[in-house]
Image (cartoon, rainbow, N blue to C red):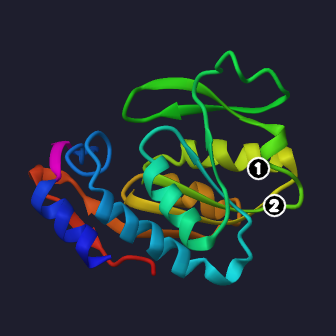
Amino acid sequence: MKELVERIKKDGHVLSNGVLKVDSFITHQVDAELMERVGKRFAEVFADKGITKVVTIEASGIVPAVYAAQALKVPMIFARKAKSLTMSEELLTSSVYSFTKQVTSQISISKKFLTGEDKVLIIDDFLANGQAAKGLVELCQQAGAEVSGIGIIIEKSFQSGRALLEEMGLNIVSLARIASLENQRVEFLEEDA
């Protein structure tokens, strides 16, 4: 997605060879118009997959996932990283390690929102080592739902996440694929879609 790549070039900051900071438009302050276009692009790419639910993990995946769900006219579910007092029903749970935060979280979704009837599109902001997406896939599998695709805003292609998910037989579409963050420069590969 050319517009996304240009925004990363303009406003992304390389913090190290493995970390790209995009907090001015995705991960802290959100450019809602850009995220709407990102969500619509995912909806276009996966339009023929019969998606019934869009699933993400809190927090940075929520905005693009909402826009994808809106364009697909289906509900969006986000996996919570902390159980709230109102989540008293049976939960689907998985452990997820965050590359950026260097912490493992238990994520959960209520069983009443995800079933074996669902065809799921997973949306996430970053793909690095693939642990967040893998955790979301595990939640879907626990529910008996089919993962019909994974939409990633920014993929760090030099890390192992894509290979992990492809080994699981999953269809991944990344809108911006980064080949390298070395020498404080963002080098891109061609996008998937």
Number of marks present in the image shown? 2
Q: Is residue 136 above or below residue 166?
A: above
Labels 2 and 1 touching (C-beta < 8 A): yes
Q: Is residue 187 above or below residue 14?
A: below
Quadrant position of residue 164: bottom right
Q: Main secondary structure of the magenta part?
A: strand
In front of the other: 66 or 56? 66
Kind of residue sitting beneath label 2: Asp
Q: Is residue 14 magenta?
A: yes
Q: Is residue 84 left or right of residue 127?
A: right
Residue holding disc 1: 140
Q: Quadrant of the C terminus?
A: bottom left
Query: Residue at 47% of width from left, 61% of height from top?
Result: 152
Q: Residue 118: which numbered mark, if any?
A: 2
Query: Residue at 29% of width from left, 49% of height from top?
Result: 30
| Span highlighted in magenta in the image | 12-16
